[in-house]
Amino acid sequence: MRLTTTCTIALAAGLSLLAAGCGERPKVTVYKQGQYQGKPDTRPWDNDPPKDPSIVAWQKGDKASWEKSIKARTLGQNEYVRIEGASNK
Amino acid sequence: MARMKFLADAERCIECNGCVTACKQEHDIPWGVNRRRVVTLNDGMPGEKSISVACMHCSDAPCMAVCPVDVFYKTSEGIVLHDKDLCIGCGYCFYACPFGAPQFPQDGAFGLRGKMDKCTFCAGGPEPDFSEAEFRKYGRNRIAEGKLPACAEMCSTKALLGGDGDVIADIYRSRAITRGRGSEVWGWGTAYGRPEKKPAAQPPGAKS
């Protein structure tokens, strides 16, 4: 009787181990874009424009006017336009 | 607005390291950390080429992808920034970055790796604009002042352009059209264009 019980327990344990093996899933890492965990940042156009003659002033809080100011600054890097008569065209 | 980008013109860079110096000075960068550096190919040989390299503020930034604590974020202008308070200094971003942009201060014993430091496109970080904390951690915020990165603005030959990607691409395009090509493979004419040559007067009736 005891032998039968032991055999039954062993068989059950073996079957459960086999079943666990069947349920194993492939371990492939799938990347998921994480969420930024840090502090929120402020936006550049939410500041007052500095009193600098080289900067085109923008309206505080107005993104479009800040972008216009930055674009004017960026175009200043083109010396063909900035320096009159420098173009070789 | 498109995305803020850097554009390095190898034809114009004279390896003066003015961009490196401007960056160091502007943000009070400690010794051993180089947010920007100049890389030269075929150094010392005729026709050597140099480009200024820093964080390129990638549209699909690998540093953002690999960071285990998600400290990176992208501003609406496409500038890749990070929160130093959460950085654990693991160095994954350094391994992932194709430009070697992430820098780690190593001022402690046993090669201690501090919090990552990199080019911010002079846009500061997640601290109140113009605050002492922002300057100490990330450097000066020139973008909030309506200015462009110090490296690009200080570049004497305008080899390094910074700003809205569309605008600087237009500048570079006009430069490429103006440039002379032919016998002059490198030098002044290639970098700045050839002087204007008026077409020779043709006799009437001659075919062009």
Image (tube, rainbow, N blue to C red):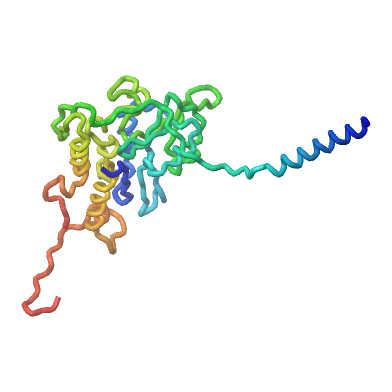
- Taking A13 as reference, is B38 left or right? left
Of B204 and A59, the residue lying toward us: A59
Where does the image place residue A17, in percent across and percent down from the top left? 76, 38
Question: In which quadrant is the C terminus of chain B drawn?
Answer: bottom left
Q: Is B42 placed above or below A71 here?
A: below
Q: Residue B101 sits in which quadrant?
A: top left
| Residue found at the far front of this picture | A1
Of B170 and B82, the residue lying toward us: B82
Q: State whether residue A10 appears in this view.
A: yes
The residue drawn where x is 81% and y is 37% is A12
Q: Residue B38 sits in which quadrant?
A: top left
Of A71 and B118, the residue lying toward us: A71
- Taking A19 as reference, is B15 left or right? left
The residue drawn where x is 11% and y is 50% is A85
Q: Is B138 placed above or below B39 here?
A: above
Where does the image place residue B180, in percent across and percent down from the top left? 24, 59
Q: State whether residue B105 appears in this view.
A: no
The residue drawn where x is 39% and y is 49% is B44
Where does the image place residue B174, in percent across and percent down from the top left? 22, 54
Q: How many marks?
A: 0
Where does the image place residue A44, in percent across and percent down from the top left? 26, 31
Question: In which quadrant is the N terminus of chain B drawn?
Answer: top left
